Image (spheres, helix red, strand yellow):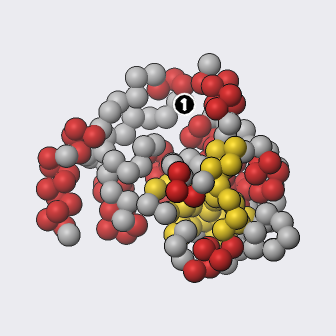
Amino acid sequence: MRIYLLSFLLFAVPFLVTAQTDSSQFETPTIDLCQDSLLLSWADRYALYPGMIENPRLVHLFENWKGTPYRYGGSSRNGIDCSGFVSMLYDSVYKAMLLGGSADIYRKMQTVEKEELREGDLVFFRIKKSRISHVGLYLSNDKFIHATTRGGVMMSDLKEPYYRRYYYKAGRIPQAVTEQLLN
């Protein structure tokens, strides 16, 4: 596995890396995937290989917040809830404000089929059967990041039995809103 990864890094990654032409749009630092050891470490830990994550800022924000305890209504490193975490990510990475709880955020989204998920989409869960009660941000390869009551900020897999059982739907910011944010 490590030989394959090393070969991939030496030969394929330089062709996959593209620079952001207008970094002022998102004020996201340009990160060289070939030299970013954090991104490379994700290959072994999470099966998310270089090139699978379009916005490396997500990786860095997650690593900085990983393990932050869950606190209902929280929005700081002392404690954060799922909607607060997703809102912070969207504000920091995409410069988009998502307000309210997970059900409020869902109502503002354009529904996306599970098979069409892409980085930055939101995944919603009905853990309390009658309503949407949890949200996370999708990365790639069925992985998503979220704040949980038991583990705080963490990464999980949509294929895990628990999340398969409670998965409800996925959503994406409507195209019209995205265009407004970029202009």
Q: Nearer the viewer, residue 77 or 58?
A: 58
Q: Is residue 63 visible?
A: yes
What secondary structure is found at the residue carrying circle 1? loop
Residue visible at 65% across and 77% down in the picture: 165
Quadrant into which the N terminus falls? bottom left
Q: Residue furthest bottom?
A: 161
Vertical order, 9 against 43 (above or below): above
Relative image position of residue 72 (x, y in whole percent): 80, 65
Rendered residue at 67%/24% (across/down): 180
For image coordinates 55% across by 68% down, the residue present is 158
174 vs 105, left or right, is left
Residue of label 1: 26
Q: Is residue 77 left or right of residue 161?
A: right
Q: Amino acid at mark 1?
A: Phe
Which quadrant is home to the C terminus? Answer: top right
Q: Is residue 41 visible?
A: no
Image coordinates for residue 156, horizontal then vertical, percent: 54, 69
**How far from the left and from the top, in percent, is residue 99?**
79, 45
Residue lying at the far top of the rendered structure: 183
Q: Relative to 140, is 35 above or below?
A: above
Give the answer, above or below, for where 179 lies relative to 48. Answer: above
